[in-house]
């Protein structure tokens, strides 16, 4: 089963793409809740390149590496990747309000569809807030 989440970011396409693919930015937005954070990130943005984000509870009680391999890159448009035997696709769609970022991923069996959708949506919402907070006031 595939799950899709999306958000629209009020920023130029190049800015949205850069924030999604730059380790320093990823460490600022990649968390599903305030009690988690990303402590390290690496990106080799090319087909066959690896990525990794170290996600940890702020209290140090647990953590994990979200890591995989890019399988398709279309600059400013599409990122596809494999992680842990699953796949995901990130589409960057220009719209009048900015850029809609849509993430579609293979569900896993440990958590409910609602939990997975909620977690991935929360991360995407953090991403939008991060990018928009860096835009000049209009």
Image (tube, rainbow, N blue to C red):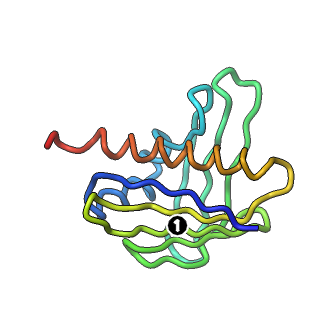
Residue in the picture at 42% in, 46% down: 25
Q: Secondary structure at mark 1?
A: strand
**In this image, 1 relative to 127: left or right?**
right
Q: Position of residue 81 (x, y in %)?
A: 62, 70
Residue in the picture at 38% in, 41% down: 130
Q: Position of residue 122 (x, y in %)?
A: 56, 42
Which residue position holds label 1? 90
**In this image, 111 relative to 44: left or right?**
right
Residue found at the very far right of the displayed protein:
110
**Could you tell me which quadrant the C terminus lies in?**
top left
In which quadrant of the rendered view does residue 5 lie? bottom right
Residue found at the very far top of the displayed protein:
59
Sort mark 1 into few (<14), some (14-19) or many (20+) by Cα contacts within 10 Å: many
**Could you tell me which quadrant the N terminus lies in?**
bottom right
Q: Nearer the viewer, residue 22 or 13?
A: 13
Residue in the picture at 39% in, 53% down: 19
Q: How many marks?
A: 1
Q: Position of residue 89 (x, y in %)?
A: 58, 69
Q: Nearer the viewer, residue 55 or 44?
A: 55
Residue in the picture at 60% in, 39% down: 32
Q: Is residue 6 above or below residue 82?
A: above
Q: Is residue 24 above or below residue 56?
A: below
């Amino acid at each position: 089963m595939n799950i899709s989440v999306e958000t629209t970011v009020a920023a130029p396409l190049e800015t949205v793409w850069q924030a999604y693919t730059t380790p320093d930015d990823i460490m600022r937005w990649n968390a599903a809740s305030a009690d988690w954070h990303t402590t390290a990130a690496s990106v080799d943005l090319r087909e066959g390149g690896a990525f990794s984000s170290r996600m940890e509870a702020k209290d140090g009680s647990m953590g994990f590496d979200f890591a995989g391999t890019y399988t398709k890159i279309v600059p400013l448009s599409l990122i596809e990747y494999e992680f842990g035997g699953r796949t995901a696709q990130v589409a960057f769609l220009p719209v009048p309000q900015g850029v809609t970022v849509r993430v579609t991923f293979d569900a896993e069996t440990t958590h409910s569809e609602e939990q997975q959708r909620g977690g991935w949506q929360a991360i995407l919402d953090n991403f939008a807030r991060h990018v928009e907070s860096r835009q000049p006031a209009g």
